[in-house]
Amino acid sequence: MKKYGTILVVDDNEAVLTALRFCLDATFDNILTLSRPDDILKTMAQQEVALVLLDMNFSLGVNNGQEGLLWLRTLRKHHPEVPVVLLTAYADVQLAVRGLKAGAADFIVKPWDNDDLVRKLKDVLDLQAEIVTLDAVEADHIRRAIDRCHGNLSEASKLLGITRQTLYNKMKRLS
């Protein structure tokens, strides 16, 4: 059975984290769990993550989803290539729509059905694998131009129709 890399699960409830570890063990190579969202960016800087499963509420007594939406926007800014699936016990259509408009790949309600949860996560990753980002296309195009010019960046920039400085900037941004 195909495994799907590393998933990062962020939820303040340890019982939820434990349940998800068991539920997702057969589907993912590695399951990272965090009980505090403050460590998300640090964790993702240290480990390649294929998908983030993010709770919407982390403060006691707060159930409006604003914390999850804030962290979703942060993840979209710093890791736009990593899909984020939102998870909440306090679901309503309006919150789901706001999450999807903010860039969430899907929205799952607690309590979840294990088979449905796994299917949704697989679907998100399978769809992600089908889509090639513009950055990836550009990086491949630049790489092929440089190879064609045998590493001569001046010639590659001419072939690409850009200045040498622009080529340097693109190479720096894409690396």
Image: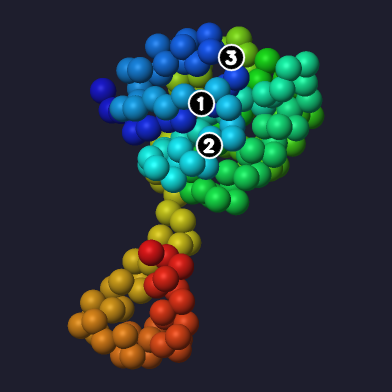
Q: Which mark is residue 13?
A: 3
User: Mark 1 = which residue?
Assistant: 34
- In the visual, does 106 lie left or right of 129? right
Task: Count up the numbered dots.
Answer: 3
Image quarter for residue 84? top right
Q: Which label's residue is closer to the chain start, 2 or 3?
A: 3
- In the visual, does 4 lie left or right of 61? left
Q: Are marks 1 and 2 in contact (CB under 8 Å)?
A: yes
Q: What separation in Å lies between label 2 and label 3 (alpha carbons)?
A: 16 Å
Q: Which label's residue is closer to the chain start, 1 or 2?
A: 1
Q: Quadrant of the C terminus?
A: bottom left
Mark 1 Cα-neighbour bin, 10 Å: few <14, some 14–19, many ≥20: some
x and y, in percent, of residue 66 in the image: 75, 32
Residue at the spot 53% in from the left edge and 35% down from the top edge: 39
Mark 3 Cα-neighbour bin, 10 Å: few <14, some 14–19, many ≥20: few
160 and 15: which is toward the camera: 15
For label 3, the SS is: loop
